[in-house]
Amino acid sequence: MLTLYSMPSSGNSYKVRLLLALLGRPYHHIPCESQSPELQTAKTEGKLPLGKVPALHLETGEVLSESNAILWYLASGTSWIPNDPLDQARMLSWMFFEQNRHEPVIAVRASLRSYPHLADEATPELLEELLVSGNSILDLMEHGLQGQDWFAGDTPTIADIALYSYTHTAEDRGGFDLSPFSAIRDWLNRTGALPGFEPLTGPAHG
Amino acid sequence: MLTLYSMPSSGNSYKVRLLLALLGRPYHHIPCESQSPELQTAKTEGKLPLGKVPALHLETGEVLSESNAILWYLASGTSWIPNDPLDQARMLSWMFFEQNRHEPVIAVRASLRSYPHLADEATPELLEELLVSGNSILDLMEHGLQGQDWFAGDTPTIADIALYSYTHTAEDRGGFDLSPFSAIRDWLNRTGALPGFEPLTGPAHG
């Protein structure tokens, strides 16, 4: 059986748990919460090759790191990845955007507001700067959803899973106002209604 | 013919030009240097859907953004992408690592040291912080290359192109010392010797 090391409160980890739920795939879960001894043990024992959760341990003993690469592996051969290389590239475009531009702003603002050990770094100037850049990221997403239900076309793909994770907590945890972004709000509702959907249940503060 | 909007001085843009050179594919190049009127015009005219270069315009009029997604599209059907989904996931793992962890540290340190318009942000404290975190990123790469010539296995893939771009300028532009990283240095030499290789020729300072 697959073994997943993941952080209950983290969006990058939630992506993987969400796809496993949507696929109906059983797995052994080893929770490694932020600042927990379990996370430290997993690092010390070499269970996290790139030093971070999530990490997926396959039956063969091989380990995959990086949430979006794990999504690719799990979704291979399913409808969650399109077949055409151009459609795949469009999907991956949103997934690289998520890791390079969305997560470092929207997830980082949520972390600064939520995790007690980051409180000293959460200056009003930094939070304001992240609010402004986060809204421009949300603008690009709103634009990307014009005339389509899902980011990479007519059906949900792993780009939707990747972007859902930190967007659906952008209001509660990140302090963003999603009311001007009606296409994003509709897409969040659509994703939350997918068969097999499971909510993020980890603590909001780590 | 393909049309590429790219920034001569930028590593994200260089990745795409390098792969096109290695593949021997002709393309029309529209240089958009940092702070240039050409870049502003491309943005204003809607040529950059996610607001950034590189952007690849296909013969059909469709546009692809995000450097690593463009690499995926261009390399599809070639030996630069492995066929097996697990090998693909391993390759993508390094490419997401590159966009989420490598580029925001190693490329950002190079930008802060190189681009005159960023000089005010380049405080000694920030440069030191990026030096420390950059060295831990280089450690992970050095470890990943133990016992193998290329990041995703026995042959070069687009993960190598993605990581080469900002690593080969880490000393000159980024101010990192690569002498302790012998596997990285050997891999840089190996990549620079690939048939069709073209060097980064854009200005170091934008």
Image: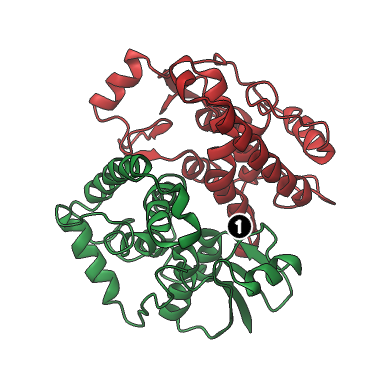
Chain colours: A green, B red
As rendered, which of A179 and B85 lies closer to the eye? A179
**Residue assigned mark 1:** B88
User: In the structure shown, which secondary structural element does the residue marked by tag 1 occupy?
Assistant: helix
Q: Position of residue B196 (x, y in %)?
A: 67, 26
Q: Chain of mark 1?
A: B
As rendered, which of A125 and A98 lies closer to the eye? A125
- Work out which residue is located at the far front of the displayed protein and give it: A120
Relative to B141, A188 lies left or right? left
Amino acid bearing label 1: Gln
Relative to A32, B28 lies left or right? left
Check the picture and name the quadrant holding the N terminus of chain A: bottom right
| Residue A36 in the image: above or below residue B112 | below
Q: Look at 68% across and 29% down and name the residue there.
A: B168
Q: Position of residue B131 (x, y in %)?
A: 65, 35
Q: Look at 53% across and 26% down and name the residue there.
A: B123
Q: Quadrant of residue B172?
A: top right
Q: Position of residue B71 (x, y in %)?
A: 52, 41
